[in-house]
Amino acid sequence: MKKTVIVLLFAFVLAVAVSPAAAKDLKVGFIYVSPIGDAGWSFAHDKGRQVVDAMPGVTTSYVEAVSEGPDSERVILNMARKGYDVIFATSYGYMDPMLKVARQFPNTTFMHCSGFKLNANMGNYFGRMYQARYLSGMVAGAMTKSDILGYVAAFPIPEVIRGINAFALGAQAVNPQARVRVVWTKTWYDPATEKEAAKSLLDVGADVIAQHQDSPSPQEAAQERGVYSVGYNSDMSSFAPKAHLTAPVWNWGPLYTETVEAVQNGTWTSQALWPGMEKGIVDLAPFGPMVPQAVKDMVTKKKSLLVTGTETVFVGPLRDQAGSLRVPAGAAASDNELLGMTWFVQGVIGTTQ
Amino acid sequence: MSVLQIKRRQEPLFIWGSCLIFLGAIVLSLGISSLLLLIQDRPPIQGLVLLFQGAFGSRWALEDCLVKAIPIFLCSLGVAIAFRLQVWNIGAEGQFALGAVGATWIALNFGTLPAPLLIPLMLATAGIFGGLWGLIPAVLKTRLRTNEIITTLMLNYIAILILDYLVYGPWKDPVSFGFPMTEVFSDSAIVGSIGATRINWGLLLCVVFGVMVWVFLRFTRLGYELKASGENINAARYARLPYERLVWLVMILSGALAGSAGFLEASASLNRLQPSIMVGYGYTAIVVAWLARLNPLYIGIASYLLAGLRVGVEHIQLDLQVPAAFGGIMEGLILLTLLAGSFFNHYRLVIRRAP
């Protein structure tokens, strides 16, 4: 009896030892600031994750609704401890926590979205969403009757301010009378607050509601009042089919698969990536049926110019709200100026505080 | 026909009875949580094991949870003092914010001082700022007879807006690309970690403050007056206890403790001030204080357990891919069963046959 057990054990050990070691799956982790059911920012990132998950030799997981304070450091740390090979942190506030963890885990690849810090094993990435914002602004500017565009915005940080400016410039390009009124919610994701903010804009006469928020509730507010809206992050037309003109949307899949492939091949290097429409990372959601063909054509034409790089969004002369010249005529704002943008262009009503 | 009747117990349940109820409540809530996991096609046993491992199962887990428990403990200790006097301080959140602001003000202006001088100065300033923020509703309550639940709650919003104003405005780091955050504190303004752990020295502060509050409530005359007034305000007034001054005192202490938590979060955890420092510890503290029946030792335990629950749920999320809302549901379930269970400390159900 005892002998049989020993023989069996021996056979088992042998079998385990000689069976070819399966290629280790690359573990890829994602950290989201809001629930993936938000139909917005985290939803778009998670669609990118699903593309990665379908790659051969890769498994993925995520933690959602992680607040940007000390909690995020622990979540990133736990992924690194559990042997995740690539970690994507998808909110600005994760930058410093991720850097702290990156220094402790030199063999793990860290990727941070929307920040500016780098480490040997930590890269950052973002997309030129302002290009799509500009195009959506053109649509809004063409569709408004009151010339008041409402903009529900999260936090007065450069990313959001840049988007508002691009939206305003796009609107003014087709409708010089258009004004953009901004309300800050001081939250990325809070459907009730977002909706209230949208209503406050509707109350002052806005007839197109745009948003830099992660839930579709501003869209719903617009539809309830029978006016138009411009979504964000993903195609939000299903939430407000009668209001939704279009939406600047994210498409993270290509960037995520490229990064993971580079790590698999050992060719990944730490760098700051800021691709735009030419890479398809940002785009415009399909136009709603209420958008006239002439507007569609105009926007599509401008889009092709942005894609080829023939034209850019922030070209001078650009003046701030107080009227002082920020970008001289004939010049274009540099990437550093865009990344640190803290002033509104003329025609935006609101403060950057 | 039989009837279910609620009867008040002659004496509250003795300690083992309470423990039994506590355990029963935990088991019940974990059971319901397992069912929820099962509904989502997730292995419930593995889920509970992950939860346990995440909260207690390794050195990492202990460190992670202790770090998270520190601010909860300090805020909770603070509100517990006020609750003893039946002063309903809902304002720990704002007092926490002001404490962080006070500490940051010192760190930004006197960052060159050596740490042994700077850290106590930051702590003291945080305590004073938080304490004064607590004093405002106390004075309003005693002089104008405003309801402190409303005023403390409203002052939270004001405090957070002050914090926002500072980090979006005068204190914004010039090299942060316009993002709302102060510059990183100088090394001497950062409370370090204990040895090679992730736990900061704030843990020591928790122990010291915890013992001090316990001694104060138990062995000092003021502490006794406080408890006596809390139990019956009219009797206390009749006995000529200085109720007004007691209210001021508890609100200052309460605010100072929450303020010290704000100081630790800014200094030890974030190394700077930024809006994301506000994650609702001030509100969590109220729940913890009640669960712990306002006892400093129990507050320590409850803070750790709640921190463990939150950390453990992250592990379930990562390994089993359950939605984040599951964590909230689980926390709610545990709190609900515990509070419902405490009903049985004072009451019992008897089945009576109707005549």
Image: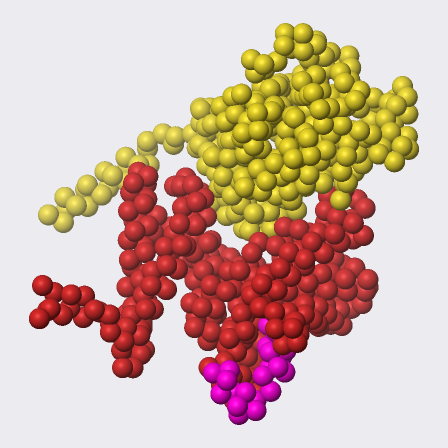
Chain colours: A yellow, B red
Q: Write down the quadrant of residue A340 in the picture.
A: top right
Q: Where is residue A284 in the image (x, y as percent from the top left)?
A: 62, 19
Residue B233 lies in the magenta-colored region: yes
Q: Where is residue B65 in the image (x, y as percent from the top left)?
A: 49, 59
Measuring 50% from the left and 27% from the top, which residue is drawn there?
A239
Q: Main secondary structure of the magenta part?
A: helix
Looking at the figure, which quarter contains the N terminus of chain B?
bottom left
Q: Where is residue B170 in the image (x, y as percent from the top left)?
A: 81, 52
Left or right relative to B166: residue A59 = left
User: Is residue B322 something that shows in the picture?
Assistant: yes
Measuring 56% from the left and 61% from the top, which residue is drawn there?
B282
Q: Write down the quadrant of residue A7 in the picture.
A: top left
Measuring 75% from the left and 16% from the top, which residue is drawn there?
A174
Q: Write down the quadrant of residue A219 in the picture.
A: top right
Residue nearest the viewer, comparing B279 with B51: B279
Instruction: Please give the count of numbered marks on the rendered protein.
Output: 0
Asked if residue A266 is positioned above or below residue A183 in the image, the reply reads: above
Residue A157 lies in the magenta-colored region: no
Q: Where is residue B156 in the image (x, y as percent from the top left)?
A: 63, 59
Residue nearest the viewer, comparing A106 with B177: B177
Looking at the figure, which quarter contains the C terminus of chain B?
bottom left
User: Is residue B194 something that shows in the picture?
Assistant: no
Measuring 37% from the left and 59% from the top, which residue is drawn there?
B336
Q: Give the range drawn in magenta.
A: B232-256
Residue nearest the viewer, comparing A200 with A103: A200
Asked if residue B26 is positioned above or below residue A18 in the image, the reply reads: below
